[in-house]
Amino acid sequence: MAVDPAAQPIDAQVLGSTEVDEGALRQLLRRAGRAIARPALECLELMLDPGTPPQVRLTMLAALTYLLVPVDLIPDFIPAAGFSDDLVALTALLGLCTRHMSDPIRIRAQRKLDRWFPPTR
């Protein structure tokens, strides 16, 4: 590869913190927080709802615990099979949430979401 002798070297500069649009960054992080927090709050509200059957609560709690605890039946470092047990727990959790979610539960989760992550205008 030939180098152009007329090309001038380019000095790299590090942007100062005054050149970063911190408002835009904060807004982006809030949107990401809302997107991630919504399903978690809906699951929480479903578990806390008195109309949710006890066996559904127990299954949700077991699936969430399994996903959060670092000890797995099949270690995650095993290629292909490592995340299969996590996928089963996640699928069970999503199925329960889909089947038992109601509008009042979604509304309560939305209100909590709006308190914790105020919507951007």
Image (cartoon, rainbow, N blue to C red):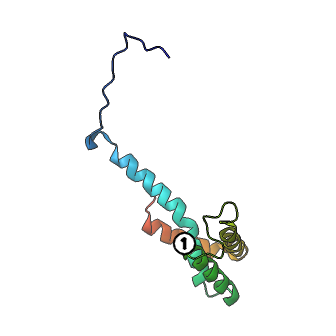
Q: Which residue is mark 1?
A: 41
Q: Position of residue 54 (x, y in %)?
A: 67, 89
Taking the image as shown, residue 51 lies to the left or right of residue 69, namely right
Q: Is residue 19 above or below residue 59?
A: above
Quarter of the rendering containing residue 87 = bottom right
Crowd around label 1: few <14 · some 14–19 · many ≥20 (10 Å): many
Q: Is residue 18 above or below residue 66?
A: above
Looking at the rendered structure, the kind of residue marked 1 is: Leu
Task: Judge whether residue 120 can be spotted in this image.
Answer: no
Q: Position of residue 92 (x, y in %)?
A: 71, 74
Q: Position of residue 100 (x, y in %)?
A: 70, 77
Q: Looking at the image, which is closer to me, 8 or 78?
A: 78
- Residue at x 58%, y 67% (from the top left corner): 39
Task: Judge whether residue 57 can be spotted in this image.
Answer: yes
Residue extending farthest to the bottom is 54
Taking the image as shown, residue 91 lies to the left or right of residue 25, namely right
- Residue at x 38%, y 10% (from the top left corner): 5
